[in-house]
Amino acid sequence: MSNLKTIFIYTPTWLAFGGGEKYVLLLAEVLSKLSNVSVTLLSDKCAVTRSALEEFSHADLSKIDYRNITGINAIKPLTRDADIFICLSNYQRIKSTARTHVQLLQIPYGKINASSISVKLVQGKFKEAVKDLYRLRLLSFSRDEADLVITNSKFVSDTLQQNFGIQSQVLFPPIQNYFCEGIPKKNIILSVGRFFSGLYNNKRYDILTEAFRRVCQSGLKGWEYHIVGSVTNDSKTQQFLQLLREQNRGYPIYFHVNENYDTLRRLYNEATIFWHGAGYGVDEYSHPENVEHFGMTTVEAMSACCIPVVSNRGGQKEIITHGKNGYLWDTVEDLINYSEEIARSMKPLTSIWKQTRERYQDFELSQFRSRVQEILSPLLNNCSF
């Protein structure tokens, strides 16, 4: 067993149960299937269990060791003899004593300097100003010390290269197949993503629900809008969700909070149209961090032949070819017009469903495995893929 490679994987954001965490778990699954590899997940969140992570991600963690740690200070002694430490972090610089450090970066930060930090301080955004100092440390570490940096889209990679000189390898997220035979399409528009009103995760449900109300008022009958998303217990998020419910009372708008996998899969297959609004109204060159970094849920919807109508920002543009396998919108009027065009279409939608399904296949798990092999094989030269 002298050729055994030990890999430790950590993120401080397990509790988010978002796309980044799913990405890490599926990467861990792929690595755990290699010969002569031992994979260990580290978590300092007592509320997070292996079973919760498996249920959330639908990843196979059976060959992975799972350890709760008391905090990030426990990482260095644990990884002293490790071959590789893989870390996903949005602003914290987390070091280990492993021989090789792989940094996962998934936020396309805009330029951070003394001037930008000063502006935030003047605006009273003290917490964000302090976080920017931490972000600069993380980004400098990633550029100068990390052995390998992996980003989740070309948009993220290009932005970090341009703004911070970080060289990275692009590893698109692995997208699970949600397609299920025998579930007929319905007059449903679907959105999937966390209920969150903040800097990086705002899915603009305020804009999307307003757009659907306008669709209803225009005379389009028999359609429903379903939103599936996780919700944390903090007061700001709860207030945001309550406001959405109040604003949309009386309309066929349904909120599915912290739903299970089976419900999500059913809705992906029943929905005809998929809406995504992250990045609406944002200048992606000045504030790239505020647009969608890739768009995992968009591709998940495409796997189930759901037609995406998504914001023309960030990583979404890498996924969609406008008019072929979906639609990219810049204004709310565009969003409504494209959606009504689909909804009122007298033509069969079979052709565009086929195109969405084919585009999904470029991001399925087999493609992810091949890319992992290409990127990480130099670090795992004694292991077979």
Image (spheres, rainbow, N blue to C red):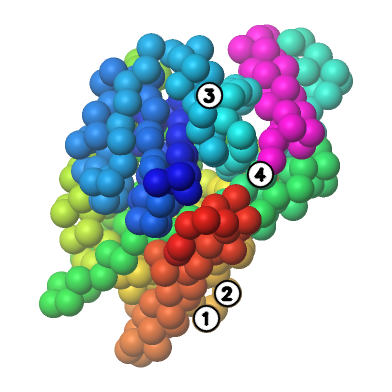
Amino acid type of disc 1? Answer: Lys
Name the residue tied to disc 2.
Answer: 321
Name the residue tied to disc 3.
Answer: 80
From the image, state whether disc 3 or disc 4 is nearer to you: 3
Left or right placement of residue 167 versus residue 38 in this view: right
Are circles 1 and 3 on residues that touch, CB within 8 Å? no
In the displayed orientation, state which residue is furthest to the left: 182
Q: For the C terminus, which image quadrant? A: bottom left
Residue 181 part of the magenta segment: no
Q: Is mark 4 on a helix, strand or loop?
A: strand
Q: Can residue 289 be seen in this view?
A: yes
Name the residue tied to disc 1.
Answer: 324
From the image, state whether disc 4 or disc 2 is nearer to you: 4
Left or right placement of residue 217 versus residue 197 in this view: left
Q: Distance between the residues labelled 1 and 2?
A: 6 Å
- Residue visible at 70% across and 49% down in the picture: 168
Instruction: Write down the region rendered in magenta.
Output: 124-147
Are circles 4 and 2 on residues that touch, CB within 8 Å? no
Is residue 212 placed above or below 257 in the rendered structure? below
Q: Is mark 1 on a helix, strand or loop?
A: loop
Q: Distance between the residues labelled 3 and 4?
A: 21 Å
Closer to the chain start, of discs 4 and 1, is: 4
- Residue visible at 21% across and 50% down in the picture: 261
Residue 134 part of the magenta segment: yes
Amino acid type of disc 4? Answer: Val
Closer to the chain start, of discs 1 and 3, is: 3
Q: In which quarter of the image is residue 352?
A: bottom left
* Camera-nearest residue between 352 and 182: 182
Name the mark on residue 149: 4
* Camera-nearest residue between 60 and 155: 60
